């Protein structure tokens, strides 16, 4: 798999630093995306079924909702990466994550169905990023009123997943 160098400040909005900074600076993003998916699946499938519907506080998402949120976010950020890699000049829209989660139906889905979708999206993301020409990763564009490079969007996908898995370990598995 190809190497994708980690983005630097200015290639993403300041709030995305929480997702990008914790990732390794080894350029092996595609490898990490693949391994992180396997790690997530292994952890979640080791949990009792009732834990997948647990909320640590009122109004907080269940583990199933978090998983579908990770998939939705990856799909949206991968689409943004595609648009910007192809030199889209129009601003790309934002999305309201709480509305997406509310209407996802995640809690009614079987966990194997969620992981089928998660794996398909992850494989698609990796294949897309692996196919981009080298110069595409430094291309910049605007999404949700913020400037991103393609590689920053790619790193967001990995870091966002790592962030939510940290939340699951801290808040749901005590």
Image: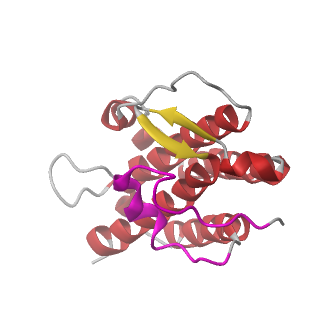
**Relative horizontal placement of residue 26, taking residue 141 as reference (left or right):** right
Q: Nearer the viewer, residue 44 or 151?
A: 151
In the image, what residue occupies the spot 42% across and 32% down?
144
In the image, what residue occupies the spot 23% across and 50% down?
60
**Mark count:** 0
**Relative horizontal placement of residue 3, taking residue 19 as reference (left or right):** right
In the image, what residue occupies the spot 39% across and 56% down?
63
Residue 72 is at least partly visible in this image: yes
Residue 124 is at least partly visible in this image: no
Q: Quadrant of the C terminus?
A: bottom left
Where does residue 76 sit, x and y in percent of width and height?
55, 37
Depicted 116 relative to depicted 89: above or below: below
Q: The magenta stretch spans which residues?
A: 3-26
**Relative horizontal placement of residue 139, taking residue 98 as reference (left or right):** right
- Predominant SS of the magenta segment: loop
Q: Nearer the viewer, residue 29 or 52?
A: 29
* Residue at the front extreme of this rendering: 10
Depicted 132 relative to depicted 96: above or below: below
Depicted 140 relative to depicted 153: above or below: above
Q: Quadrant of the N terminus?
A: bottom right
Q: Is residue 63 magenta?
A: no
Where does residue 113 sit, x and y in percent of width and height?
61, 45
Depicted 95 relative to depicted 171: above or below: above
Where does residue 44 sit, x and y in percent of width and height?
50, 66
* Residue at the top extreme of this rendering: 90
């Amino acid at each position: 798999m190809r190497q994708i160098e980690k983005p630097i400040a200015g290639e993403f909005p300041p709030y995305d630093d929480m997702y990008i900074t914790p990732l390794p600076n080894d350029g092996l993003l595609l490898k990490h995306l693949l391994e992180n998916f396997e790690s997530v699946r292994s952890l979640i499938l080791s949990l009792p079924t009732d834990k997948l519907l647990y909320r640590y506080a009122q109004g907080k998402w269940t583990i199933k909702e978090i998983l579908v949120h990770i998939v939705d976010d990856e799909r949206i950020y991968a689409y943004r990466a595609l648009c910007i890699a192809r030199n889209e000049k129009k601003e790309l829209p934002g999305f309201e994550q709480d509305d997406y989660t509310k209407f996802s139906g995640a809690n009614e889905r079987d966990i194997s169905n969620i992981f089928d979708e998660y794996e398909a999206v992850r494989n698609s993301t990796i294949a897309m990023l692996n196919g981009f020409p080298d110069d595409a990763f430094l291309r910049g564009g605007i999404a949700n009123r913020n400037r991103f490079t393609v590689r920053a969007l790619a790193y967001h996908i990995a870091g966002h997943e790592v962030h939510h898995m940290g939340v699951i370990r801290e808040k749901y598995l005590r």
